[in-house]
């Protein structure tokens, strides 16, 4: 059957499978394909656990503040240690580092699995807090190492296209994982979510061991970590484009991302959904993420990244204010899709720019500044907004967050700086 030229189906087919498509361009590299599949399977497990974790915490405590606390604990290590991650990764063998970080993350998932099997809904919240802190600490090294492997496994000329497709692993898993997590939660139980996640880390371990690219350090291990960290910080603060992107990302992390920790409360209290519905709200955000990856991949070679950054922040403000005033299921799910699309467009575009603007010798420590802006600042907003939701209601917290993000969007549009790579 021949597809009609110009039809939507034909355009999708050409996007993925035409000989000159960007998809074919990056997936022709063997090591990239292996790492992509390993990361995807691992992320599916992580999103399955996220669904189970949100449900478990809210069932045990019934508290929006505790939902925020667990999210806070998973992110706060990056606040303190994240800036050191890239500097440390630049000094170590990334293959060994990725393998050991996956093993440690798997151990955390198994701790909760066995604890729940023994105690059920009486599982102490302290165990969940400990595992969240452990996972956040390990992520300080795991995140920059995993992202830098892409630069090690693909030619630089393909890097602008590879980065959005790298992000597709996380965001495609954000659609698939919650859907599976909702089914497991409803039919097998919350413990199964942790078990599946623990097993899923093996996929990235095997992928890391299978690739052939050189993943050793850049041979600068003689320099003190403090000097390397300072070098990355100073470069970011003295490069006008990176400095502006860093501040914009920091503001969004502080004001706009707390809603993710509150999705179980949104599903149960605002929408009145059951356990399957908890997975559905995560999936809606994931659908938006896939749309964002399609957008950023198709525009990777165009000089419109500044407009993407500004438009994404604006859309996040509108979405948060919409969630604060609307309870209709269809509209709320559409807003969640928009929020997922906007946040991934923003952070994926910034990820690309940080890697493309920074010189190769500084890429790891400069990328850590991006990761810190994304994940390290988040706890400073997640927990206070969670407290506000607990004491004054989730809708008020969403409205305040939307208003503050709107101020940030206004500042972004008034900024005259051209936010592009050369």
Image: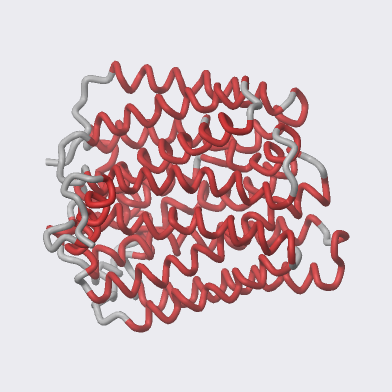
Which residue is rendered at x = 50% and y = 60% of the image? 139
Which residue is rendered at x = 71% and y = 32% of the image? 270
Which residue is rendered at x = 33% and y = 59% of the image? 166
- Quadrant location of residue 252? top left
In the figure, is residue 123 to the left or right of 339? right
Number of numbered markers: 0
Q: Position of residue 128 (x, y in %)?
A: 72, 58
Quadrant assignment for the C terminus: top left
In the figure, is residue 297 to the left or right of 381? left
Looking at the image, which is closer to me, 32 or 17?
A: 17
Quadrant assignment for the N terminus: bottom left
Q: Position of residue 265 (x, y in %)?
A: 71, 39
Q: Position of residue 406 (x, y in %)?
A: 45, 19
How are the colours assigned in the image? secondary structure
Q: Position of residue 299 (x, y in %)?
A: 21, 42
Looking at the image, which is closer to me, 103 or 280?
A: 280
Which residue is rendered at x = 69% and y = 40% of the image? 267
In the figure, is residue 67 to the left or right of 380? right
In the figure, is residue 270 to the left or right of 163? right
Above or below, 347 against 403 in this view is: below
Above or below, 169 against 251 in this view is: below
Above or below, 358 against 20 in this view is: above
Looking at the image, which is closer to me, 128 or 335?
A: 335
Outermost residue on the front side: it is 1
């Amino acid at each position: 059957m021949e597809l009609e030229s110009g039809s939507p189906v034909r355009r999708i087919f050409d996007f993925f499978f035409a000989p000159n498509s960007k998809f074919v361009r990056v997936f022709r590299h063997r090591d990239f394909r292996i790492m992509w599949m390993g990361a995807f399977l691992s992320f599916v497990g992580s999103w399955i656990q996220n669904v189970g974790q949100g449900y478990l915490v809210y069932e045990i405590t019934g508290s929006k503040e505790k939902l925020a606390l667990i999210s806070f604990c998973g992110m706060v290590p990056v606040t303190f240690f994240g800036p050191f991650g890239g500097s440390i990764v630049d000094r170590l063998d990334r293959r060994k580092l990725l393998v050991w970080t996956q093993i440690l993350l798997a151990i955390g998932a198994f701790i909760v699995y066995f604890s729940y099997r023994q105690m059920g809904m009486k599982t102490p919240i302290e165990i969940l807090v400990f595992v969240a802190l452990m996972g956040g600490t390990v992520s300080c090294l795991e995140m920059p190492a995993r992202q830098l492997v892409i630069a090690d496994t693909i030619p630089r000329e393909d890097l602008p296209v590879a980065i959005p497709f790298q992000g597709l692993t996380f965001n495609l898993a954000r659609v698939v994982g919650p859907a599976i997590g909702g089914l497991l939660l409803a039919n097998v139980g919350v413990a199964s979510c942790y078990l599946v996640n623990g097993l899923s880390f093996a996929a990235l371990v095997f992928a890391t061991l299978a690739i052939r690219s050189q993943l050793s350090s850049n041979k600068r291990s003689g320099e003190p970590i403090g000097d390397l960290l300072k070098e990355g910080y100073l470069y970011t603060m003295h490069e006008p484009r990176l400095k502006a992107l860093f501040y914009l990302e920091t503001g969004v992390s502080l004001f706009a991302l707390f809603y993710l920790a509150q999705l179980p409360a949104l599903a149960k209290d605002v929408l009145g959904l059951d356990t399957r519905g908890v997975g559905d709200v995560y999936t809606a955000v994931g659908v938006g993420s896939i749309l964002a990856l399609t957008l950023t991949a198709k525009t990777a070679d165009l000089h419109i990244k500044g407009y993407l950054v500004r438009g994404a922040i604006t859309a996040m403000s509108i979405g948060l204010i919409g969630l604060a005033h609307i309870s209709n299921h269809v509209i709320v799910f559409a807003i969640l899709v928009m929020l997922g699309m906007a946040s991934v467009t923003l952070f994926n575009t910034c990820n690309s720019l940080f890697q493309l603007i920074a010189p190769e010798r500084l890429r790891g420590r400069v990328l850590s500044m991006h990761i810190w802006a994304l994940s390290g600042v988040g706890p400073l907003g997640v927990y206070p907004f969670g407290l506000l939701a607990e004491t004054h209601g989730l809708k008020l917290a969403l409205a305040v967050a939307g208003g503050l993000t709107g101020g940030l969007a206004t500042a972004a549009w008034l900024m005259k700086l051209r936010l592009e790579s050369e």
